[in-house]
Image (cartoon, helix red, strand yellow):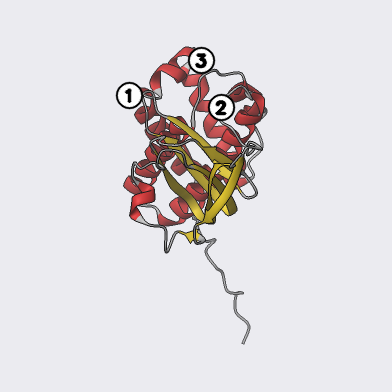
Amino acid sequence: MHGHPPTFEKPELAITEADIAHLVHSFYGRVRADPLLSPIFDAQVHDWPEHLHTLTSFWSWLLLKKPGFHGNPMPKHMRLEGLSWAHFERWLALFRQTTIEMQLPPLQSVVDAMAQRIAITLWANYQQHHPTSPWVHEVPKDLVSYKVSPVFTQENVPAALQSTHSTKAGTWGVLRVFSGALIFTVDEQPPRTILLCEGDQLLIPPQQPHHVSFVGDGSFVVDFHKKRAL
């Protein structure tokens, strides 16, 4: 007996264009109301409907390989002045808040990771294009190492290093990142932040209040220095 061949319903996409549009509009609604981010965006965006359309096209291109996006966001971000990692960190926090509230796990698992990679890439390039900074990466020749910390990871980093602390008088720290990425924040007014990636090092002056936080998995050590005896 011959019958009709079986038919199968085409499964729905886990992520749709409607989901992406909802994400973009909800997220940037938060951005425009945020006291840290809104001044930056309002100074640059003169047509918000057009900007939201462009951003929706960008994410549709990333997630669904949908054609229609033409542009390069990197140069526009590089031309901005006065950005710090704190701006990107706030951007990520609002993004994650939006994806959590959407309650779409397939979307959240993909776009949260993408957003973090985008933020880290933009910040790393921004630092290269704005080299004038108070950060010191080389160890002065008149300093000598006298003690090295254990290797710290997310699992064993002391809580004290993640809250405001400082080295004692006469002690410099040299923070060396072995893997992953680390945010170093100087806890002064105004706060200053820098993103340190694998292979980077940073000189920490005596008694400078600061704290560190990981961006994903990573590891680092602190090499303590003092003035070389004459």
**What's under tag 2, amino acid-wise?**
Thr
**Residue wearing tag 2:** 54
- The answer to which quarter of the image holds residue 125 is top right
**What's under tag 3, amino acid-wise?**
Gln
Q: Residue at x 55, y 68 (%)?
A: 8
Q: Residue at x 40, y 28 (%)?
A: 191
- Up-down relation of residue 163 to residue 83 (above or below): below
Q: Residue at x 38, y 23 (%)?
A: 190
Closer to viewer: mark 2 or mark 3: 3
Q: CA distance from mark 3 to mark 1?
A: 15 Å
Q: CA distance from mark 1 to mark 2?
A: 20 Å
Q: Residues within 10 Å of mark 1 (few under 14, many from 20)?
A: few
Return the residue nearer the eye: 205 or 153: 205
| Element marked by disc 3 | helix
- Up-down relation of residue 78 to residue 43 (above or below): below
Upstream in sequence: badge 1 or badge 2: 1
Estimate the x, y position of residue 42 in percent, counting from the top left.
Answer: 44, 15
**What's under tag 1, amino acid-wise?**
Ala
Return the residue nearer the eye: 211 or 150: 150
Closer to viewer: mark 1 or mark 2: 1
